[in-house]
Image (cartoon, rainbow, N blue to C red):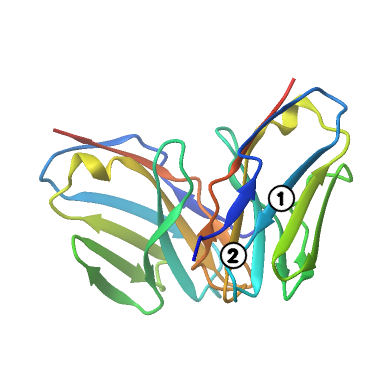
Amino acid sequence: QKEVEQNSGPLSVPEGAIASLNCTYSDRGSQSFFWYRQYSGKSPELIMFIYSNGDKEDGRFTAQLNKASQYVSLLIRDSQPSDSATYLCAVGGDKVIFGPGTSLSVIP
Amino acid sequence: DAGVIQSPRHEVTEMGQEVTLRCKPISGHNSLFWYRQTMMRGLELLIYFNNNVPIDDSGMPEDRFSAKMPNASFSTLKIQPSEPRDSAVYFCASSLDPLAGEQFFGPGTRLTVL
């Protein structure tokens, strides 16, 4: 069974620090990789996507993909209390599979 | 665009009753997804449609669940009869490509079955 795994957390970081969120997947045929952010009581929203090995930066967010290791990560620089949320990794192959999510808490 | 629209936002019903959840996808999106989210099981894909045709319903828990998409702008998820273990938040999402993860989620329906 194809799986997407994440540390459930909670991950706590001080304001201004770098938060590092990790995700591994089992399907080597996966082609697309996504990070969604979900605030408590709200719906998931897409914040980053990456298709090729390497890094992709968007503002304070950097997605990193290593297909050989079947690993994708999300770095959040200069973390803010407003970044406190659950982050869902999603992997696309013959269908999109979501990981269980990592809860991030940014402490002021 | 108003985004994905779901109704009702909250539903409280008694065990054994029929529940119908509704979704209007973003105009122009070809694919529609129904998810269920609980603390224990996370976000689970129940079924998805492409061009109004059900493509993968392997996530539908059992025959009590059914989904339809009669046209490009409307879909329903029905539970009959409902059970307490069906209590969850049900999300509808739409996208331009069924294999892409760039999905846009609706606000969800919080279902409570007593």
Name of the residue lying farthest toward the front: B1
Could you tell me which chain the residue with mark 1 belongs to? B
Q: Which residue is mark 2?
A: B94
Whether residue A22 sits left or right of residue A60 in the image: it is right
Give the class, few, some or many, for how many residues have Cα within 10 Å of label 1's Cα (few <14, many ≥20).
many
Give the class, few, some or many, for how many residues have Cα within 10 Å of label 2's Cα (few <14, many ≥20).
many
The amino acid pointed to by label 2 is Ser
Could you tell me which chain the residue with mark 2 belongs to? B
Q: Quadrant of residue B68?
A: bottom right
Name of the residue lying farthest toward the bottom: A52
The image shows residue A75, relative to residue A101, as above or below, that is: below
- Helix or strand or loop: what does disc 2 sit on? strand
Q: Quadrant of residue B92?
A: bottom right
Residue at figure coordinates x 49%, y 60% from the top left? A90
Q: Earlier in the sequence, mark 2 or mark 1?
A: 1
Location of the N terminus of chain A (image quadrant): bottom right
Q: Which residue is mark 1?
A: B22
